[in-house]
Amino acid sequence: MKIAIYPGSFDPVTNGHLDILERASSIFDKVYIAIATNLAKAPLFSAEERRDLIQSCIGRFPNVQIDCFDGLAVEYARKVGASVIIRGLRAISDFDYEFQMALMNRHLDENIDTVFLMPHEDYTYLSSSMVREIARFGGDISAFVPPEVKAALCNKIRRLS
């Protein structure tokens, strides 16, 4: 069985993330969406909230499982028996960072490969931080996130205002 992890903060999950997930789930037997705890970021949603939001969007992917982790992605990959780390590349500006990360991960464990997937061109400009920013200023995020994510994001921003 070929197992992959798709790590990220997913704060919130976007249509771009789901597009990458759809591609990954068609290639691998099992894909773990691995919600990372990133100490350098202050997420809007808790890990549990992010897990619930992702769960509400992935019903069509029977081979996908959601989990949370902290620490190194390669350690998490080893823990679940994954041999691949999925990373999305939106633009050339993503490549430098992702390439360095892939090389470091290979150094940490040469048995775990990184596979880069590009989202559909409709999502190449999309990021969670952009979606949060647009939502904070009252912009329409309907084209960027599933309806349940839009509702949760708008409610969260209202509560914080």
Image (cartoon, rainbow, N blue to C red):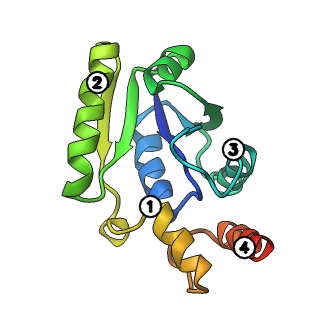
> For the residues marked 4 and 3, what is the alpha-carbon distance in whole angstroms?
17 Å
Q: Secondary structure at mark 3?
A: helix
Sequence-first disc among 2 and 1: 1
Q: Which residue is mark 2?
A: 104
Q: Nearer the viewer, residue 56 or 101?
A: 101
Which disc number belongs to residue 47?
A: 3
Q: Residue at x 36, y 42 (%)?
A: 87
> For the residues marked 2 and 4, what is the alpha-carbon distance in whole angstroms?
38 Å
Dot 2, crowdedness within 10 Å: few (<14), some or many (≥20)?
Answer: few
Dot 1, crowdedness within 10 Å: few (<14), some or many (≥20)?
Answer: many
Q: Residue at x 33, y 23 (%)?
A: 105
Which-is-in-front pick, marks 2 and 4?
Answer: 2
Sequence-first disc among 4 and 1: 1
Q: Secondary structure at mark 1?
A: helix
Side of 41 relative to 115 (left or right): right
Sequence-first disc among 2 and 3: 3
> For the residues marked 2 and 3, what is the alpha-carbon distance in whole angstroms?
25 Å
